[in-house]
Image (spheres, rainbow, N blue to C red):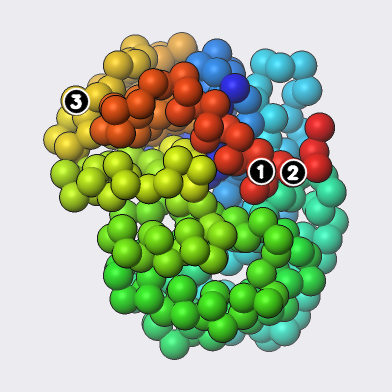
């Protein structure tokens, strides 16, 4: 079975809401049944705030255990663009961090398998300034990730952010867990990727990592034991305009618009965990590898990092 190391299952789109407007009924159960039917065995639900961390834990605990859904696990952490929440919190940043740590401790050994989604995003500084991002990335690394001892699920946008992120991780290398984690949705240079690999991180590949010919060249040269795959659903779908699209073999029936929603069909433009197979096909295609062999390798990689010691 495949492992989707990152899906935003708490996104309103899976409740039928698009840009704050209700378009169709809640269909997350159907989305997860489709994923299971497509061979996805486990999904890591990504949280980007304290509220989402609590929601993610609740979703994982409520999931059926009969094989109709993939197994759900989750992260606890604050997304770089939302680090303003630390300072906006009524009781202050220390209390916010303490509450995050409590959520992580409550879920550790159960659904919570990683700290994240956290890191640096210099592409969207309009949501949170660089200095606030840097401050709370480091604080989460030291005061959340280190005490929990869980692998990291890292967000990194722009080459400059990659340099800063790697420098901070190198500075705190002694605090990194034995299985450091993954840099998700990677779309940077091979040089940046290899700096993370050298620290023991895997590189998370999704549709956003496969847009251009340059992206494919990077993916081609990554060490096989360092590749993990993800959808980042409902974002980062593989589009017909992407360089990697020529390698896609799988397809699902879909409706053109959310308001035309039909039971049993995907919605055009809304990525789902079932589409993980397309990511696998593109990565295998551009590397000239057998799809099933790569499936086994990426699953083993994800198990090694995020599921070590779990049955």
For label 3, the residue is 246
For label 1, the residue is 304
The secondary element bearing badge 2 is classed as loop
Q: Assess whether mark 2 and mark 3 are in contact (beta carbons under 8 angstroms).
A: no
Q: Position of residue 151 (x, y in %)?
A: 66, 58
Spatial separation of the CA atoms under disc 3 and disc 2: 35 Å
For label 2, the residue is 308
Rendered-image quadrant of the C terminus? top right
Q: Position of residue 25 (x, y in %)?
A: 50, 26
The secondary element bearing badge 1 is classed as helix
Which residue does the image show at 44% across and 87% down from the upper left?
131
**Position of 165 relative to 107 (above/below):** below
Spatial separation of the CA atoms under disc 1 and disc 3: 31 Å
Task: Mark 3 or mark 2: name the one nearer the start of the chain.
Answer: 3
Which residue does the image show at 71% across and 17% down from the upper left?
67
Q: Quick one: 51 or 143, which is closer to the camera?
A: 143
Q: Assess whether mark 3 and mark 1 are in contact (beta carbons under 8 angstroms).
A: no
Which is more foreground, mark 3 or mark 2?
Answer: 2
Q: Is residue 46 left or right of residue 289?
A: right
Which residue does the image show at 19% across and 37% down from the upper left?
242
Q: Assess whether mark 1 and mark 2 are in contact (beta carbons under 8 angstroms).
A: yes
Spatial separation of the CA atoms under disc 2 and disc 1: 5 Å
The quadrant holding residue 45 is: top right
Task: Mark 1 or mark 3: name the one nearer the start of the chain.
Answer: 3
Rendered-image quadrant of the N terminus? top right
Which residue does the image show at 30% across and 68% down from the upper left?
158
């Amino acid at each position: 079975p495949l492992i989707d190391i990152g899906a935003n299952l708490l996104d309103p789109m899976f409740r039928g809401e698009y840009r704050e407007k209700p378009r169709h009924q809640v269909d997350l159960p159907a989305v997860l049944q489709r994923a299971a039917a497509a061979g996805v065995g486990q999904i890591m639900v990504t949280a980007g705030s304290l509220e989402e961390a609590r929601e993610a834990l609740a979703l994982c605990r409520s999931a059926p255990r009969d094989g109709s859904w993939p197994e759900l696990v989750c992260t606890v952490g604050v997304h770089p663009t939302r680090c303003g929440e630390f300072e906006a919190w009524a009781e202050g940043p220390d209390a916010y961090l303490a509450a995050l740590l409590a959520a992580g401790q409550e879920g550790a050994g159960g659904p919570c398998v990683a700290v994240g989604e956290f890191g640096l995003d210099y592409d969207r500084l309009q949501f949170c300034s660089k200095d606030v991002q840097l401050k709370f990335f480091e604080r989460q690394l030291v005061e959340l990730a280190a005490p929990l001892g869980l692998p990291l699920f890292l967000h990194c946008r722009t080459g400059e952010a990659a340099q800063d992120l790697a420098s901070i991780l190198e500075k705190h290398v002694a605090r990194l867990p034995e299985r450091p984690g993954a840099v998700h949705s990677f779309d940077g240079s091979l040089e940046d990727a290899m700096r993370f690999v050298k620290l023991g991180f895997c590189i998370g590949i999704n549709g956003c990592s496969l847009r251009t010919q340059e992206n494919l060249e990077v993916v081609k040269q990554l060490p096989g034991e360092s590749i993990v795959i993800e959808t980042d659903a409902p974002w980062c779908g593989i589009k017909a305009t992407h360089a990697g699209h020529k390698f896609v073999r799988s397809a699902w029936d879909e409706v053109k618009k959310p308001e035309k929603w039909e039971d049993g069909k995907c919605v055009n433009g809304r990525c789902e965990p079932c589409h993980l197979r397309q990511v696998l096909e593109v990565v295998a295609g551009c590397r000239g590898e057998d799809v099933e062999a790569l499936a086994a390798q990426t699953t083993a990689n994800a198990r090694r990092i995020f599921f070590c010691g779990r049955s």
